[in-house]
Amino acid sequence: MRLGVLDIGSNTVHLLVVDAHRGARPMPAFSHKAELRLTEYLDQDQNLGKEGVERLGDFVEEAVRIAEDKGVEHLLAFATSAVREAANGEEVLARIDRRCGVHIAVLSGRDEARLTFLAVRRWFGWSSGRLLAFDIGGGSLEIAAGVDEEPDVAVSLPLGAGRLTRDWFTADPPAPEEVRGLRKHVRAEIARTVGDVMRYGRPDRAVATSKTFKQLARIAGAAPSSEGPYVARSLSRQDMADWAAKLTTMESAARARLPGVSPGRAAQLAAGALVADAAMDIFEVERLDVCPWALREGVILRRLDLMPGRLDQLDAGAK
């Protein structure tokens, strides 16, 4: 089956086309994305502005056309924190549905964490034991932990790299007092979750997903994406602490010249590094393994799980 996943995130809007079958790993067939940075279109009343809505509608319309051209049988569309928190989010999605004929589901922060955890579990397998997973998006930080495919605990915090950059930094590079203020805020927010997350036990493996973590691992020496998804990549606590200190003193243009850092995300990488550093430090994680699968793959895997399978057919035949 050819599936299309339309992911409307706070930074990027991404159409991923995959060939997927129950019991098999989803195989990417085509990818199309744009950095819309929807949070930048929020006004003082937290409404998505007209320009942002038009750009989003244009992309969705284009994505529907591409999905049809690529032979997609089912298009799964969802939105995360930027639309979820917009005061006019429901109105925007209803307008896009009327224009493009696409129903876009709004995922809660907890569902983001749960579905990302599912993808991480499937990638690393049962032998990884208890997993602790972190995902830094544009609008939120997701944390989940557990021994099964459904996490014991799933948390979403308003600590996305784009959100924090917009709300806390006024200069490039940010002033030392701004960095200190954000660092204090991030650590206090994350520290509130430690008791709930760790009450079930220490993780056997700590994992990170998302573009922010991938870029941080790359500048700390991990293999480039050109070497493929099966190359092991990780990020140490000491490297993270060192780079968090460096990135907050660099201009965005200098960050963009670092290996693996895209120009569109360079501005928010410093805030993302402060979140990653805080998460590793407060949860006492010495090393994070980087997982190439994240929320989109989790959505695909859950969809495949809900498809009728051979056991359903056997049950029907037995009646």
Image (spheres, grey):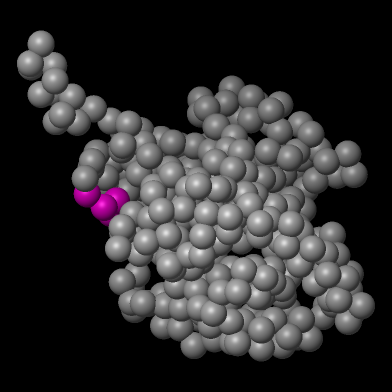
Q: Dividing the picture into quarters, in which one does residue 238 lie?
A: bottom right
Quarter of the image for the N terminus: give it: top left
Relative to 77, residue 286 above or below: below
Query: Does any portion of residue 207 appear in the rendered image?
Result: no
What is the residue that sits farthest to the top in this orientation? 319
Q: Which residues are magenta?
A: 24-29
Expressed as whole percent of the image width and height from the top left, the position of residue 207 reads: 48, 66
* Residue beneath the point at 69% across and 52% down: 157
Number of marks in picture: 0
Residue 305 seen in this snapshot? yes
* x, y percent for residue 133: 51, 60
Is 153 on the left or on the right of 54, as rendered?
Answer: left
Depth order, front residue of 91/164? 164
Q: Position of residue 275 (x, y in %)?
A: 69, 68
* Vertical position of residue 125 compared to residue 9: above or below: below
Front residue of 248/16: it is: 248
Q: Which residue is located at x 77 percent, y 53 percent?
A: 40
Is 55 colored magenta in this rendering? no
- Say which residue appears at 19% left-offset and 31% top-offset: 309
Residue 20 or residue 207, whichever sits in front: 207
**44 left or right of 209?**
right
Percent coordinates x, y for residue 211 in the rendering: 54, 66
Extreme-left residue of the structure: 318
Quarter placement of the C terminus: top left
Please tell me which residue is depicted at 42% across the width and 60% down the height of the picture.
130
Where on the picture, by quarter, is residue 99?
Answer: top right
